[in-house]
Amino acid sequence: MKTIAVLTGGGDCPGLNAVIRAVYKTARSNGIDVYGVKNGFKGLVEDDLSLLGPQNISGILPRGGTILGTTNRDNPFKYQCIDKEEFVCKDMSQRVLFNLKQRNIEALIVIGGDGTLKIASEIADLGFPVVCVPKSIDNDLPKTERTFGFDTAVSIATEALDRLHTTAESHHRVMVLEVMGRYAGWIALHSGIAGGADCIIIPEIPFTWDSITDKIKLRQQKGTLFSIIVVAEGAKPINGELSVARIVDNCPEKIRLGGIGDKIAHELEDLLKVECRSTVLGHLQRGGSPTAYDRVLSARYGEAAVNAIINKK
């Protein structure tokens, strides 16, 4: 084994650069060159790769995002091209294999979530060696106990709850924090426990309005005039619908969730006649420096990925 490549796909996530750094360091210590693929699978189709060196990975351990760039739109098996002034989707997988082989790249490390890993699996089915590193702030990948980025997202959400607690208590309000997670409630659950939320609402357990109002009324009866609620973006009431922010065509994730926090705040204000405010944490959960835990986990993932290639596991 002399040459490998690494790419990042899907949404950005704290810890990506730590994985890239560990891949490079482990590979070089075994005499293996590493190519970085720019902007996910698009870089494989467009042959946008560059040989990584010490100058590329110096100082990137604490940095958020990814030095390679990423996208969740460019599936090489359904690649958008312009043909006769119209957008069409073409299978560019053979071009991907050609671009890898012409650089004598012998294996590919793909860092990504469920959509990215599905594409990686399809490339592996073509006979090219692929090792995948699971990435998701949502911690929702099957057969993976903990994905890197999750700990950072929980820490950010917990800090937000701490800050909302002081303003809620001062103004005797109900504060609702909407966090990411898609159809998984891990971020809401962990940050809610760590941040002392009074209600934690997750997609796995559809809620009733009575279950929320009863909790708030009980607190009021005890003299506590404020409450903190954390809700995952994919949560919904029993027999209710998901809150969809928008539908995006030509995107692997057409449904963009969002708005459940506002719905809960408005409904509770009507039911309880108390002031309710909602906050959407959004992409703050994805950005910034990874926690120490995520740095260590990312480094272990990167090292393990290279060792899997070397040992052909």
Image (tube, grey):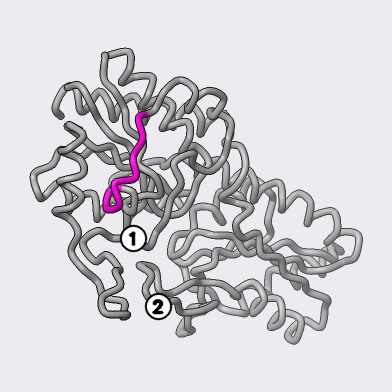
Residue at the image position 66 percent from the left and 65 percent from the top: 280
Q: Which residue is mark 2?
A: 249
Q: Position of residue 105 (x, y in %)?
A: 20, 33
Q: Marks 1 and 2, how far apart in space?
A: 13 Å
- Which amino acid type is shown beneath numbered disc 1? Asp
Residue 117, x across and y down, in percent: 28, 50
On the rendered image, what quadrant is the N terminus found in?
top left
Q: Report the residue marked by disc 1.
A: 74
Q: Secondary structure at mark 2?
A: loop
Q: Would you say 312 lies left or right of 46 here?
A: left
Taking the magenta stretch, the answer to whether it contains residue 50 is yes
Vertical arrangement, residue 130 with respect to residue 46, above or below? above
Amino acid type, label 2:
Asp
Residue 134 visible: no
Residue numbers of the magenta segment: 44-51
Specify the quadrant of the image occupied by residue 227: bottom right
Question: Residue furthest toward the front?
Answer: 84
Q: Residue furthest left?
A: 127
As for residue 98 lying within the magenta part, the answer is no
Label 1 vs label 2, nearer the camera: 1
In the rendered image, the quadrant that contains the C terminus is: top left
